[in-house]
Image: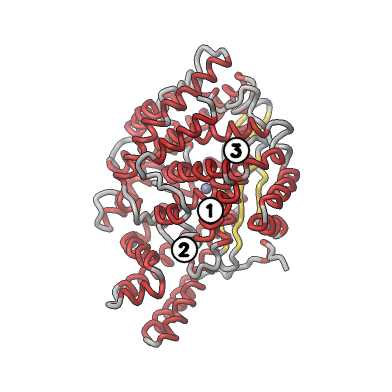
Amino acid sequence: MTQHFSDLHPPRPERAALDAAYAQIRRDLDAGTAEARAGAFARWDRERRLFESWCSLAQLRFSQDTTSETAKADRDHADRLAPEATRLDVEIKRRLLAEPDRARLEAELGAHRVRLWETDVTTFEPAIAPALEEEARLAADYTALLASARLKVGGEEVNLSGLAPFQESLDRDTRHVAEQARWSFFAGHGARLDELFDQLVHLRHGMARTLGFDSYTTLGYRRMRRVDYGPGQVAAFRAQVLEHVVPLVGRLLEQRRAAQGWERLQAWDESLVDPLGNPRPAGGHDLLVERAQTMFDRMGDGFSGFFRQMNEGGFLDLRNRPGKAGGGFCTSFPDVGWPFIFANFNGTNHDITVFTHEMGHALQNWMSRDLGSIDVLWPTMEAAEINSMGLEFLTWPHMDLMVEEGAAERFRRMHLVTSLAFLPYGVCVDHFQHEIYANPDMDPAARHALWQRLERLYMPWRDWGDLDYPAKGGRWQAQLHIYRAPFYYIDYTLALCVAMQLWLLSRTNPELATARYLSLCARGGSAAFSDLVNEAGLVSPFAEGALAGVVQEAAAFLEL
Ligand code: ZN
């Protein structure tokens, strides 16, 4: 029987019950017998899966309706309990790491999990629990503030997700008006957004200092569970993007400007990638879901049955509606092994890429559900984004199903151009955050000036025209990750460098590309990023020449 989303009822966690369950785990570990120890590991994993499932459900319900008081109360409950759950987990991890027989622990759990825990335990002390709770509250305030946007454009009232069709309209004035609507919302809430971010930066810096780190950057990397590279390698990668990608994107945009006969390419022209108009999806929600089934049927057993069950089980919420949080994500219910996809279809090509992207995450998560521990259910995010972006590229041959008639090749070209053009922006967001956390006492004006300076470095073509707010450096406030997930953003650019290798391979040997992709998904988070990439026969983005190589091939494909 198919598992149905509406049948999921993980028990609501309470502090007393959590404490009692963990006390039992500790007693079992104290008992010292192999049997009690195995029982403790199993019980612990089960407790963590149940807790995470309930929290995922609470966060999801809130994203589905940010105006619901019940959803908000449940989400607050999850945010309040999360530091307590972390405290209990860290206590057990520390205890196990302190055992004299490290070899035994590694044999039981695998060396990678032990390495993850060594990182995890440095990111928490009970003294920072109130700050963690406050951080979650501020992050949720950001989401709710953006979800409250009601923008008037083209005689319609839309939220930020609903703005996309206007932002990439063939009509230049419509694009301009859409960007005006967007930035007047941000200008109107600029002071609040500055204040929220200022609070977040100081909270994060304070947590880092309490834990004994100089700045939040070290703590941020550890919270991302990066065990195999540091800020130095990331800075070198950003420099590679500056050297190899920025000039290429500049050429692309100059070509577009000349072809359109525009005197200047304005910021609102950048979303119109295809001179004939960005190809639209083949239809609305129902048709796309139906076509997606055909697409995954054609892609083989690894994809077909899984998508059928996701759809029939109600694990998709893809329609845009008022009050729904923006963006798209994949979450999971590890007690039952099922993922869930959240998106906001808006009638543009993004519907297709968001969907294939999140399906990649979902497939990985589902394939990893039995790897033995919730610790490795998800890889670190730069590896996870290969699972998602990889599927964006591997679905290319089937785009005739998903895109409006006759536009599949144009869609593929647009997808590649958009992917390349994303890299400079992606590293700009990352660079900004490194500067922010190195200088936590910057005032809001200095933060805007910093963004403006970095934008000129990585996107020298950007011309905001009469859009004063972003022209003065306010663009970063629209980037959710800067508020909610510090240091996450570079992960998309690292992953893209690997996903594009899968794309290149798929053009000459599609079977091998799919096999490598599925084997990567099946490995979940059972190794560090570089190891996962190498094991899948791919090259780390930190390797000499890796980025330049794929970018050169992409330029050749685009005949640049
Ligand atoms: Zn993703």
For marks 3 and 1, the one nearer the N-term is 3
Going by the image, does 402 lie left or right of 57?
Answer: right
Q: Which of 503 and 360 is in front in this view?
A: 503
Residue bearing mark 1: 516
- Give the residue type that dot 3 points to: Ser
Q: Can you say which quadrant of the picture contains the N terminus?
A: bottom right
Q: Position of residue 209 (x, y in %)?
A: 26, 53
* Residue 432 location, quadrant: top left
* Other-residue count near label 1 (Cα within 10 Å), few / some / many at <14 / 14–19 / ≥20: some
Q: Where is residue 82 in the image (x, y as percent from the top left)?
A: 45, 62
Mark 2 in CB contact with mark 3 (< 8 angstroms)? no
* Residue 313 location, quadrant: bottom right
- Give the residue type that dot 2 points to: Val
Q: Is mark 1 on a helix, strand or loop?
A: helix
- Residue found at x 53% / y 41%: 504
For marks 1 and 2, the one nearer the N-term is 2
Res. 500 visible in picture: yes
- Give the residue type that dot 1 points to: Arg
Residue bearing mark 3: 161
Q: Label 2, label 3: how many angstroms apart (C-alpha)?
A: 32 Å
* Other-residue count near label 2 (Cα within 10 Å), few / some / many at <14 / 14–19 / ≥20: many
Q: Which of 169 and 382 is in front in this view?
A: 382
Q: Is mark 2 on a helix, strand or loop?
A: helix
Q: Determine whether the beta carbon of the residue marked 1 sits less than 8 angstroms from the nearest atom of ligand 1.
A: no
Q: Indicate whether 237 appears above or below 449.
A: below
Q: Where is residue 394 in the image (x, y as percent from the top left)?
A: 59, 45
Q: Indicate whether 425 appears above or below 116.
A: above
Q: Is mark 3 on a helix, strand or loop?
A: helix
Residue bearing mark 2: 376
